[in-house]
Image (spheres, rainbow, N blue to C red):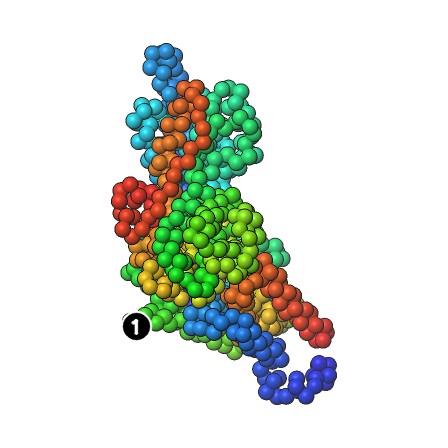
Amino acid sequence: MTNKKKGNAFTNNPIVRAIGVQKIVVVVVLILLLVFFSVKSTSFWSYASLLSIMDYTYYLAFLGIGVTFCLITGGVDLSIGTGMFCYALAGGFLITKMDLPVIVGILVTLAMGIVVGLANGLIVSKGGHAPFLATLCTMMIVRGLGAIITGGSSITWPIAGTPEGWTRNLFKFTLPSGTKVPLGFLWVLLAAIIMSLFLNKTRPGRYIIAIGSNKEATRLSGINVAKYQTLAYLICGFFTGLAALAYSSAFQSMTPGGGGGVELNAIGGAIIGGTSMSGGSGTIAGTILGVFIMSILQTGLPKVGLQANYQQIIIGVVLLVAVYIDVLKNKKLS
Amino acid sequence: MKKKLLAALISVAMVATLLAGCGGGGDEAETTTETTDTAETEETADAAETEETADADAAATGDLHLEIVSKGLQHAYWQAVLNGVNSKAEELGVSVNFVGPDSESNIQQQVQQLETALNANPSAIGLAALDTNSVMDLLQTAVDSGIPIVGFDSGVPGAPEGAIVANCSTDNLAAGATAADEVYALISDRIANAEGTVRIGVVAQDATSESVVNRGVGFITEMGKLVTEAGKTVGMASVSNERYVTDSAIEVNDEADVVIEVRVPASVTSELSAADASAILEQEDTIAIYGSNEHSANGIITANENLNKCGTGEGQVVAAGFDSGASIMNAVRSGVFAGAITQAPVAMGERLVETLVAAANGETVEDIDTGCQWYTAENMDDPEIAQNLYE
């Protein structure tokens, strides 16, 4: 409670306290980034640019929402990047190579996410493995699985404009006039609201936070820790399945063995948004804001005349700053 | 009780989905084994046959048996190579056994297949190695037992001198140059009449793979040559990847009449390629863009879905791709891409058999460019081109 006493006029303001300091900082950074890119690149402030940012945001937001649950328990899920590719490859394979209905492909994609999430949860909660190691192993497993299922070839989900291509319309709807509507934003918003309510207003959600805050105390108060820990990973798996649908709808093709590194963008988004690496705190709204920073950086940096390798460095530095803020926050609390 | 019932139901549903998922994979695996099995049985049968015939007819007809180890079997590309191999083998009256591993990461399986191929004591072997180092010993065995090996597709990069007698592969520099010729024909007027700088973009997957780099460099070098011949100056954009600038030997100059901008994403992911393609397409002076493989061309398609700038009409950006696949073929058919380059796997299979037969007969053989084709909405249904395209 020392941080309250130490706070200045800004942090003691009731409105600021209600929203959270980090979220306000993130929003300010977000606005600064938008201003910076608009000044540096004439093409940034356009509708097409907004559409590209959205394409990039959907899958990252789903991954971010899911992994926030793992992070809040004090764990992590590293299998979400390669998992997303694996499930999308499997679903796409059934649709395009086995000629099964699109809905079957979607259900298998989601089911695989749930099954792998459940497996991750059980290995961590019942098996007692460190989340980092357990999900690193499943990351390798799903990477291999994706390549085996498709026989090593890349997969394209049915393309826009074909009867089977309706999944793409769910995320980017083309009006008769030709204007494209980023419909996917609606689903991301809906998912964020539902999961935010689940996390903060329901018993299982509060238990998940409690586990990350103090696992032993949670156990002693009679809560089935293993059950709710597993639930967090299962939710993460389900959202990875949703991300797979968003990714295969926004982009052309997936290559077996791909997706590595994507998980770090999602985890980075969550951390920028104020989710603590050590568990016990985090919000879905923060994650969504953090994911927006990641996608604006990833889509904006190429436009200002920076070579790809410099872009990586900048994103790395941004993440480093976010993690440092998290470390400072934890120090203050203790 | 209710809860238990629910839990049981959920578990059943999960197991069911798991089984369904595995079912798909299982079938796949089964067919794979079947293919390999039949291939193996065929192979052993062939081997036995060859041995028999070797004794009986060796002097009389000189029947040849060829072993070909590819990098895969399932993918449509390898099926197209196999079609070329089969038709040419029939024409020349030689027996061929064509095998390949289940996936391009299954190096061990390919090594075993090459070993089996060597044991069959064939007249010659065709090889597209997944990993040269793993087959080094076997290459030596082949040299020792006097079995010539001909590389195909990506060949056997870094093989010791003398181990590979020839390569049948796409000349990627030439293929990139063909793309430049075709694109230039569509934009030459705009370059000639331009008042300020015009920009030509290249999206490349990486700056490490030899084939990918050569397809880009071939395009840039040829484009530079054509522009210079037309009396205009050419320069590379300062944001371009260094490897491409060095290899194409065109100097960085953002003020030239024609500026070529090469973008290479930091990692091979669709969203980064799309972001790079967007950055090129969004510049007002961009008149053409080229994606040097399926991945990069797909990045251009994704970017264009939002920007809607590509096409061959007045003021639109002329776009070109490389390879086929559902998205690129659709882009070519619908006019988003002016055209794309495809390799010629069928011709590759044919040239490979010819070269193997020549090598088996002790003739001197040399590297062969198996060629490429520029396909457009008009010609992509011609059988000559359609046989090389796959979704």
Q: Residue at x 47, y 76 (%)?
A: A193
For residue B310, side relative to residue A260 (left or right): left
Question: In the figure, is residue B365 to the left or right of B162?
Answer: left
Picture coordinates of residue A14, whole percent (x, y): 61, 88
Give the number of callouts: 1
Q: Label 1 marks which chain's residue?
A: A
**Residue type highlighted by circle 1:** Ser
Residue B37: image quadrant is: top left
Residue A220 visible in the displayed image: no
Q: Which residue is mark 1?
A: A177
Specify the farthest residue to the front.
B231
Which residue is pictured at 44% across the width and 23% down the height?
B364
Quadrant holding the N terminus of chain B: bottom left
Front-most of A1 and B47?
A: B47
Residue drawn at point x = 35 percent, y = 32 percent: B350
Check disc 1 and report its element: helix, strand or loop. Answer: loop
- From the top left corner, tell me how far across and down residue B184 is, in percent: 39, 52
- Compared to residue B357, the image places residue B201 above or below, namely below
In this view of the protein, which residue sits in the foreground, A192 or B21? A192
Horizontal arrangement in the rendering, residue B99 relative to residue B130 (left or right): left
